[in-house]
Image: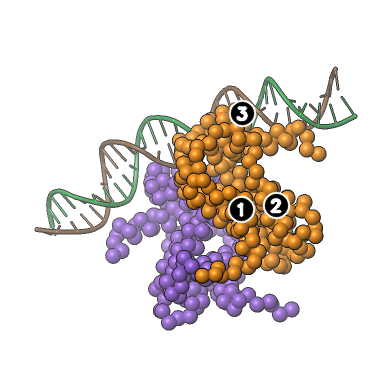
Chain colours: A purple, B orange, C green, D brown
DNA sequence: CCAGATATTTGCGTGGCGCGCATATTTGCG
DNA sequence: CGCAAATATGCGCGCCACGCAAATATCTGG
């Protein structure tokens, strides 16, 4: 069911999202024009707005899409796999670099991380990011409810799980950004974060 | 220490925020120009952008300011008052209608509520709202930490309290919006919500 | 494999927005 | 009262979001 049309659309969306992030990290949010993003993605400026209604949305879309794919991936995991194992795997699957990332040369980790931190500090972005997180959490909660046979309307459980998983990814990503060069591998950070959450966040030995 | 200058600034800010909401509820988000909001608040269009950097921010500012004042009010409550009683009172204090509300005639409850729901559904607003909530929660968490002698850096407690209080207000407001004419009194809804949260959200009798 | 149906891309035009800058006005203070 | 600092305003510029219609690409049934 995944025709050429759908694939191309997804690719364009990813390319635009990635270009928006890449350029913003390098130059700063308001030194990037929509025109630049469109050019980097190989489409017309007008097409940009067929996919996103603002620069901020384009930037946040990467995180949003990844999170939505995590929910979708969770639904694909074998039903007898324990919940947290399935969640961890579903999340991990989303962190393999796509072609749109490899295509564009990126600066060394330290410089990149600094740029990303600057980007995330941009007020115009924070709202859009939070919105994306909220949307994704709702979707993830639905998938969790489905898998565990709980009821979204009456049980807090699926939403709590979704929130915890969402937080695990967020913390892992922040930790990755704060790690010096060479960066800690994101796969390990994610695995660790999920493991801790799944264990109930016990107090660490001191 | 609250000179004429500061008071006037706060008044202008409140007037702009209220005008933005009022007009948006009546006409819809993109049938309101910044010029209209400025005019309704009695300032020049340029001045609008001295206070807010977007229409969305102006609309969200009302919720933000109320939440920030709640945190400030909590700091003013007597130290020996139980935490949740103090929180409830601090929140309640913020829900008295100011002069900028009384000045502008509002439509009947049903119509108003429908307009607000439409407004809240506007994607361009949701991000800004979530951002405001995040900022306010951080401030409230700090106030709670101070009052309870807990440590923001090591204890989850103050953030959990802030999140719960924030949710209580949000739920009460949503319930208010969903109540038919005549609306349930917001003061009672808030009191109820805080009472339930403070009791640990026990399962209701069936 | 073609032709019509459907979806996507693109160019163009328009109204509005966000903000830097210079200027006028208001407020605070000795 | 008079000066310094803060705030409000007017003007101008570059950019953005999006409606509309034409061009182009993809899909579907025969």
**Residue drawn at x 64%, y 59% as measured from the top left:** B194
Query: Label 3, label 1: how many angstroms apart (C-alpha)?
Result: 36 Å
Q: Which mark is residue B188?
A: 1
Q: Which residue is mark 3?
A: B43
Earlier-in-chain disc, 1 versus 2: 2
Image position, residue A19 (x, y; %) = 47, 53
Subunit that carries the residue with mark 1: B
Subunit that carries the residue with mark 3: B
Image position, residue A33 (x, y; %) = 50, 43
Image position, residue A201 (x, y; %) = 63, 75
**Residue drawn at x 73%, y 36% as measured from the top left:** B6
Q: SS of the residue at dot 1?
A: helix
Q: Which mark is residue B90?
A: 2
Image position, residue A41 (x, y; %) = 42, 51
For this view, does B77 lie left or right of residue A12?
A: right
Query: Label 2, label 3: how many angstroms apart (C-alpha)?
Result: 31 Å
Q: Are marks 1 and 2 on the same chain?
A: yes
Q: Can residue A61 be seen in this snapshot?
A: yes
Does C1 appear above or below B10?
below
Which sits in the foreground, B92 or A127? B92
């Amino acid at each position: 069911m995944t025709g050429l049309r759908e694939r191309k659309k997804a690719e364009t969306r990813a390319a635009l999202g990635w270009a928006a992030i890449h350029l913003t990290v390098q130059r700063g949010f308001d030194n990037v024009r929509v025109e630049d993003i469109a050019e980097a993605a190989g489409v017309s400026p007008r097409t940009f707005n067929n996919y996103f209604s603002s620069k901020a949305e384009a930037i946040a879309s990467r995180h949003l899409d990844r999170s939505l794919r995590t929910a979708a991936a969770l639904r694909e995991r074998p039903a007898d796999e324990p919940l947290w194992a399935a969640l961890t795997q579903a999340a991990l699957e989303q962190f393999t670099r796509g072609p749109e990332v490899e295509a564009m040369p990126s600066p060394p980790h330290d410089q990149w991380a600094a740029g990303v931190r600057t980007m995330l500090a941009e007020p115009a972005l924070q709202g859009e990011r939070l919105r994306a997180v909220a949307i994704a959490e709702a979707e993830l909660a639905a998938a969790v409810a489905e898998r565990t046979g709980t009821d979204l309307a009456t049980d807090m459980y699926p939403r709590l799980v979704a929130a915890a998983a969402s937080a695990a990814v967020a913390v892992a990503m922040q930790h990755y950004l704060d790690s010096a060069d060479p960066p800690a591998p994101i796969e390990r950070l994610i695995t660790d974060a999920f493991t801790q959450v799944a264990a109930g966040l016990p107090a660490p030995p001191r």
